[in-house]
Amino acid sequence: MDDDPPDERGGGQSSRPLGWLKDVNHSANVISFLRRARRALPGDPEFGDPLSVDGVGGPRAAARAADRILERNAVSREVSLGALQVWQALTERVSGRPANAEATLVFTDLVGFSAFSLSAGDDATLRLLRRVSQVVEPPLLESGGHIVKRMGDGIMAVFADPATAVRAAITAREDLKSVEVEGYTPRMRVGIHTGHPQRLGSDWLGIDVNLAARVMERATRGELIVSQATLERIPPEEFDSLGVTAKKLRRQVFAPKQEGVPPDFTMYRLRTRRQAAEDPDDGEALTGG
């Protein structure tokens, strides 16, 4: 006669499949295999971390929800994120791999904005930012640019073509002259650099993004500065049609060394020919022809 009570024996038999599934779900070998397999799938193989799921979009929203629900270090988590990774790749054409396509990055901000906002107050500052957005963003978007983020009085945008990025920036700077709030007409400084930034989720990261920001930092007087990488990719005929001249920026002798910029990194100031005639500079003049 079997000494085990029927209900206990039955409970033990029904719990075995659940126990097996639990063991498999937390198997280090299976989890490691799935993580390696995700690197062969389209999209970002690290999809699921805070950077990759930041921003709007179906896959990213689903991944944020999954992160709250699914267990850490579990097979179920890797399978779910793998499916969302493929969904992201198919719908957003996003890749987290290093070999990203060339892109031109544009950074902007307003000269004297902090002083204006301090004296004018929040209401006037908000009015100014709305007006600036209304005139600056359309030329960027209509030219095929993508606005990655808005940073107070600044914008980060990305373009596929350097000449298009420069043309859009020139138009935006010109349109900004129509903006005036409480006696303040803002000037916009712009930095443009071309490279191979890393796209991750809704953001762009990497060395080239940092360089683009450093290029903008050299536009201290509300200028348009481009890197040599951008200038070299603009054909002479396009350069002429832009109606600008380029002057190589000389190193600032007494200024502190700019951090995060290679020693041989060269930048150029772009000005319309009228500006160049009215305000000669001591840099080395270049033209497209």
Image (spheres, rainbow, N blue to C red):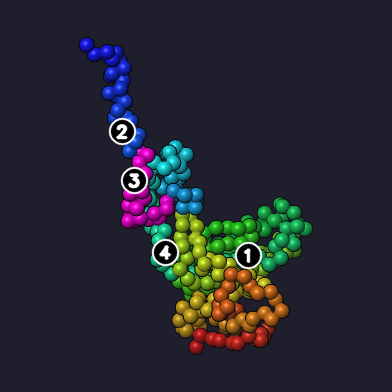
| Disc 3: which residue | 29
Between the C-alphas of marks 3 and 2, the distance is: 15 Å
Kindly state the secondary structure of the residue where label 1 is placed.
strand
Kindly state the secondary structure of the residue where label 4 is placed.
loop
In the drawing, what numbered circle is on residue 109?
A: 1
| Disc 2: which residue | 20
Report if the CB atoms under discs 4 and 1 are less than 8 Å apart: no
In the drawing, what numbered circle is on residue 98?
A: 4
Between the C-alphas of marks 1 and 2, the distance is: 58 Å
Between the C-alphas of marks 3 and 1, the distance is: 50 Å
Report if the CB atoms under discs 3 and 2 are less than 8 Å apart: no
- Across and down, in percent, residue 99 comes to 40, 66
Residue 112 lies within the magenta run: no
Callout 3 amino acid: Asn
Task: Say if 171 sits above or below 122 in the image.
Answer: below
Residue visible at 71% across and 65% down in the picture: 112
- Across and down, in percent, residue 263 comes to 58, 78
Badge 1 or badge 2: first in the primary sequence: 2
The span shown in magenta is: 25-47
Residue visible at 32% across and 56% down in the picture: 40
Nearest to the eye among marks 4 and 3: give it: 3
Kindly state the secondary structure of the residue where label 3 is placed.
helix
Residue 42 lies within the magenta run: yes
Report if the CB atoms under discs 3 and 1 are less than 8 Å apart: no
Nearest to the eye among marks 2 and 4: give it: 2
- Across and down, in percent, residue 234 comes to 47, 79
State the residue lying farthest toward the top. 1
Nearer to the camera, 161 or 220: 220
Callout 4 amino acid: Pro
